[in-house]
Amino acid sequence: MHDLKDGADIVQLIKKTKECAGEVILHTGEGDKLNLKSTLSQYVCVAMVAKPEILLRSSIECSEEDAKILADFVEA
């Protein structure tokens, strides 16, 4: 699990997940789990940009290889 960087561009993160081989799951601070490869989850994430407090304490669950692809958006 990798913490989401403060101020991470969610739209760019979603675009970058297309390069990932495995699943990319966003765990929000409120306990929600969203598969970022799912179109419905992507819409929900984009809507959350209007309420950035929801993304506080969020983390990304993915493989180590995919974490390298998402390095601009997650803490090492």
Image (spheres, rainbow, N blue to C red):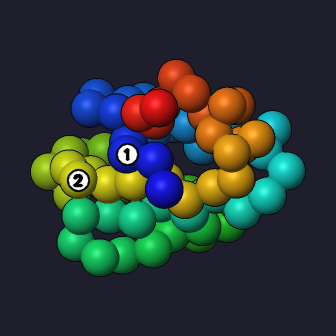
Pick the front one: 50 or 56: 56
CB atoms at circles 2 and 1 under 8 Å apart? Answer: yes
Find residue 3 and name its label.
1
Q: Residues within 10 Å of mark 1 (few under 14, many from 20)?
A: some
Amino acid type, callout 2:
Arg
Q: Residue at x 29, y 76 (%)?
A: 31
Pick the front one: 65 or 17: 65
Amino acid type, callout 1:
Asp
Residue 71, above or below 26: above
46 horizontally vs 56: left or right: right
Q: Secondary structure at mark 2?
A: loop
Residue 26 seen in the current view: yes
Please identify the quarter of the rendering in which residue 38 is found: bottom right
32 horizontally vs 62: left or right: left
Q: Residue at x 48, y 56 (%)?
A: 1
Sequence order check, earlier mark of 2 and 1: 1
Pick the front one: 75 or 40: 75
Please identify the quarter of the rendering in which residue 8 is found: top left
Query: Which residue sits furthest left?
Result: 53
75 horizontally vs 15: left or right: left
Pick the front one: 57 or 9: 57
Q: Position of residue 25 (x, y in %)?
A: 56, 63
Label 2: which residue? 57
